[in-house]
Image: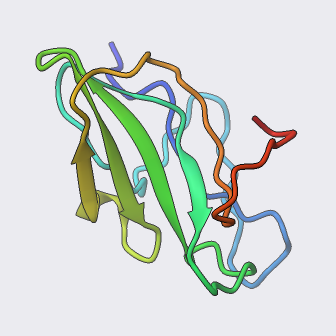
Amino acid sequence: GDSSAPMGYARLRLDGSATPQTHLKPGEKNEEVDVYWIGSRRFAGEPLVVPKKNCNLDREEDAYLLGLVYDAVKDRSALMIFDLENELKAGPVATIWLKSALPHGLHGCFSPDSFVRTSCFC
């Protein structure tokens, strides 16, 4: 059987830029996938892309990828932070372990303001 991960973060370019598009047919594999293995018995939540301070919003790489990870062995959660200017396989630039486990599937949102505001996206 196939042991490929069923989901993950993907970068897609849909804007007709100079970068060529790659289209895969059902069942085809792209062997040039940038991936980071978080480890056995660890489960990743939905990642969140957070723009860097004073970034160019037209550059996808001017952002961080934040993801909550639940470690079933330790029964603890961590926040993993990836710099999108690096390849994912380089690993997180920071891992912040929390004192306990967060509910798996917890969703959140990011606001660049320091004020707590209600968001229509959360």
User: From the viewer's perspective, is 16 left or right of 32?
Assistant: right
- Placement of the C terminus among the 4 image quadrants: top right
Q: Is residue 100 above or below residue 111?
A: above
* Quarter holding residue 61: bottom right
Q: Identify the residue at image location x=48%, y=56%.
A: 65
User: From the viewer's perspective, is 21 left or right of 88?
Assistant: right
- Placement of the N terminus among the 4 image quadrants: top left
Q: Identify the residue at image location x=27%, y=65%.
A: 93
Percent across and percent down for residue 35 are 35, 50
Percent across and percent down for residue 97 are 22, 40
Q: Identify the residue at image location x=51%, y=30%.
A: 7
* Quarter holding residue 72: top left
Q: Identify the residue at image location x=60%, y=30%.
A: 107
Q: Is residue 6 above or below residue 52?
A: above
User: From the viewer's perspective, is 87 left or right of 96?
Assistant: right
Q: Between 42 and 98, which is closer to the camera in this rendering? A: 98
Q: Is residue 10 visible?
A: no
